[in-house]
Amino acid sequence: MRLENSPSSLIDYTQPLSFVFNNKTYKGFKGDTLASALIANDVLYYARSFKYGRKRGIIGAGVEEPNALVSLEIGGRYTPNMKATEVMLYDGLSAVSSSNPNSVDFRAIIKPFHRFMPAGFYYKTFIKQKVWSIVEDRLRSLSGFSKAPSETDEDVYDHIFQHSEVLVIGGGAAGMAASLEILTNSKSSRVILVDERENLGGELINEFTTDKNAALWYQETKDKLLEYKDEENPRLKILTSATAYAWYDHNYVEVLQTNATGQSMVYEGGQAARKVLHKIRTKEVILATGAHERPMLFEGNDLANIMLGQSVRRYLNEFNVVAGKEIILYGNNDSIYNTAIDLSENNIKSKVIDVRAPGQESETVTKAKGLGIDVFQGFAVIKAKGKSRVTGIEISQVENQAKPPHWKSKWRLTGDIKTLSCDLLATSGGFNPVVHLDCHCGGKTYFDEYSQAFLPQKERNNRQVCGAVNSIGFWKDAIVDAKNKAHLTLQTLGEDSQVKSEKLTNQSLNYFNVDQFFTPLEILNKPKVFIDLQNDVTTTDIALSIREGYRSIEHIKRYTAMGFGTDQGKTGNINGIAVAAEFLDSPMSEVGTTTFRPAYTGVDFGAMAGREVGDFFDPQRYTTIHESHVKSGAKFELVGQWYRPWYYPKDGEDMHQAVNRECLAVRNSLGMMDASTLGKIDIQGKDAREFLSRVYTNAWMKLAPGSCRYGLMCNEKGMIIDDGVSTCINDNHFIMTTTTGGAASVYSTLEMWLQTEWSHLDVHLSSVTDQYSTVAVVGPNARKLMSKLCQDVDFNSQNFKFMQWRPGTVCGVKARIMRISFSGELAYEINIEANYGRFIWDEVAREGMEWNITPYGTESMHVLRAEKGFIIVGQDTDGSMTPMDVNMNWILAKNKPFSYIGRRSFSISALNSKDRLQLVGLLTKDAKVVLPEGAHIINNKGISVGYVTSSYYSPALGRSIALAQLKGGLSKMSDTVLVKIVQEKQGLKEIPCEVSSSIFYDVNGDKVDGNE
Amino acid sequence: MFLITCPYCKESRDQNEFSPAGEAFIARPENPEALSDEEWADYVFYRTNIKGDHWEQWVHTSGCRKYFLVKRSTITHEVLEAATFQEINSENAS
């Protein structure tokens, strides 16, 4: 229910908002979270639990909430698994529970039969019956998480790079104080202040009701900060509704900020991001991340309306809402008294149950008693009563027979059990410093006996911790601590700053105290004492895992699934560690914590992608000829980032028909292809020849200017990494071509050899892939067309031989014409300056009509080269093939003085085994069957002995052809092998094939000179 | 997400601009044919994989494209030194 306005309220009552939750319409106000607005409307249930299907209510008020998961909006705006406590309300918001608490759940029905489902219950029960896969599907659909989105996200997300001298994480009292101290004591340091809430102040706002000084300090500090923010060239950036979720090496922090409206707004000028991912690089970090409250443990502690004490306090003060009328506060530290006092200020009566024995009392306790609040000191809650919501509690007197510093508690229940009624129970089991971020890149925690908490390691380069994360919970102390740490930060930055070591009071110890872990075995051994509410992990699950032999907290975590949920165990894990310590009978410090990894909170995939979606996902590369391909109706294929013509269908042809037509045109008359995407590296210098003979396996010293040569490149392991033709322009100048996909890595590898090993060689490399366009003119009539296009070159086959090149003028454009062939036909590649590409292409197409010139794409190119047995590196080889494996011993130079890259490896015994996979041809016995690429060749025991790497229907041969890697294949010519394939409807089938040479067509190379 | 100061560009830049290129000071043997299979395998395959300060090669891929040397702690990921081959060679010589 909603209370009257209070001085600490952040609600704007002038702005009522309407929203829908689980198909019902409600009213809230600007400043509400979805959670606070629902509490104001007395909504009690938010979820069904993961394992038992129990109805669950809200327990927290922020990032720690384990239960109230919702999916927001629908369609392209759908966002799963948001915490209702973190969603700021906006008008028209619609949300549903991730798991509907109001539907019937079979897990809740079978509960009476399995009152006690141990850790691993479902798995252990159903795996033996071999029905786990069926059961798993059902359980997953019932479990407490939203369905994955199915539509494209309509919202947009931004990435912003930020730089600062100091990054302050956490905008509570400590963070605000630290930021201001840096700004006022430095003239140059830039500060970024980040906080996950919509407003600065953190838990300090809770103090306003009872402490005017807190409100005053807050207003003053905020005003001063805003002055810095509004300066010209401001040194301060404040990011609110922004969660620092990851801290990586070298002080790189990622922060996810949510737009106030929760969605991206569409303006005339465009769409503003729904979320912004800030990538912050900073010199110094001040960690002021505060602490999360931990719940108390007792039977039935998961009933609805059992909440965290500090959350009840925050709902009351910040949002003016309270979830019940008959309130009991239960805990082991002073924070519950503060909540009781605040309730009392609002004329709400409450009772306090404190496990600490009566004795020395703090001011807070005395004040609470003075206000007439019922206080039960030395009492513990044994059990919460009620079916789905709490209706009352059973309490008993307790005493701790242990003496500090030996922490091991010896709690004993004494006296009779009393029953109290209530409709809201708020518990506080102390505070966990939020150490997560500090541990993301190497920071360690230590267990501090004094404050009974895991604290961030004391000393770390370029980082300070202050406030509650440093176990300083009292607000005035937190401010002093923050100022002291700000001065240490300034000193590290080399600024002139004096350390003002102001003294702290000892009031913080009333929050972080020696009675932190209240874990009497009489309570822990009861069923339904929940540790992790999201994953339904109980104290008995932890006991079971220890009985079954797990000792490490990491193993206990994985066995019980404690802390696996979307809340990552922010409230539960520390209790789990305490309970494990109790059962293991070892101190907390030895049990330790589980590992904290990024991300601290969930990050939307959309935010990770930012604007790099759709057309911006990857660069798209087009040749200068692209528009002509589009005009010709080409279908495109992505090769690396290049869009290459795949085939050019005509008159409703399918790919098979188009490729047959294209291939036959090349074999019988004339074809043309855009070969511009091949990698081209310009190599110059007087040692260029020497360089080529070091990186290629064959000889280069005698290649005359005007000639070209095919080369095969290996790595030091002796494996093929690339191939291509290099052209000798003159003795000091070569142009190397590489495979389209390998261009970048080959270039980088060559540079590495030159820069690291052979810096004395006079060789310079330039990537010129984009500088030249290449049009290949291919087919028996190629010479006739070339003679027509280019008058200043003699194309006579005696004067311009295969593997030679000539400079010439093609249609008025200066060109290098290479006579090289990837199809076995007479072929010329016209290389021109890139911008002439389309002009030359169109001219070639027009002049070639006489011979019915046919443009062909990558698919026909593959068929044509496979017919000739030419390999494609990366398709027929896979990084584990040597030149010998592909039957190319002829390309290995014997007498080169320099031991070229990879050569030494060729003599290693493993590379000479007869049993290696070797490249062969395969001819199916049934000429019509085209084998699927990747199909395995099997031996008579059904075991794979190789696989198909390339497979096509060859129109020139009128049958199918395939290349394959086969164990010892080169010595198995004419053998029959079986290839196992899956056929639609018919299932698995074994296809008999004959092993053949990998050259299928024009074995003697007669066609390379074409028609005269 | 390291910050590396390229010894050629003299600027501290994000790791995104660089690519790692393996352990440093693995010299290619002068005469590979004279080595035993074990010695050759040691050069091709085996690396020290140390815990501590580690010299490695990096290349400023999106910058000057120069290869250079980086001394990095494999424990803390702190970059302790970045230098050109020439700088390190002359240091070793003197």
Image (tube, rainbow, N blue to C red):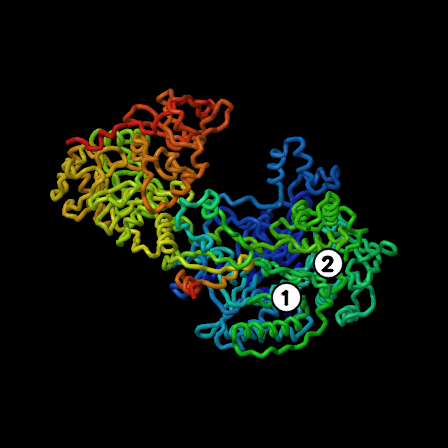
Q: Which chain does tag 2 point to?
A: A
Amino acid on which disc 2 is placed: Thr
Mark 2, Cα crowd under 10 Å, few <14 / some 14-19 / many 20+, is many
Which image quarter: residue A783?
Answer: top left
- Place of residue A864 in the rendered image (x, y in percent of width and height, measured from the top left): 29, 32
Above or below, A91 against A653 in this view is: below
Q: Are marks 2 and 1 in contact (CB under 8 Å)?
A: no
Q: In the drawing, does residue A579 fall left or right of residue A619?
A: right
Q: In the drawing, does residue A951 fall left or right of residue A67?
A: left
- Place of residue A927 in the rendered image (x, y in percent of width and height, measured from the top left): 35, 21
Residue occupying the far front of the picture: B34
Same chain for labels 2 and 1? Say yes or no: yes
Above or below, A997 against A71 in this view is: above
Residue under label 2, please give it. A427
- Place of residue A964 in the rendered image (x, y in percent of width and height, measured from the top left): 40, 30
Which image quarter: residue A932?
Answer: top left
Residue A544 in view, yes or no: yes
Q: Which chain does tag 1 point to?
A: A
Residue A841 in view, yes or no: no
Residue under label 1, please give it. A458
- Judge by depth and name the residue closer to the eye, A912 or A41: A912
Mark 1, Cα crowd under 10 Å, few <14 / some 14-19 / many 20+, is few
Amino acid on which disc 1 is placed: Lys
Above or below, A103 against A319 in this view is: above
Q: Quadrant of the C terminus of chain A?
A: top left
- Dot 2 or dot 1: first in sequence order is 2
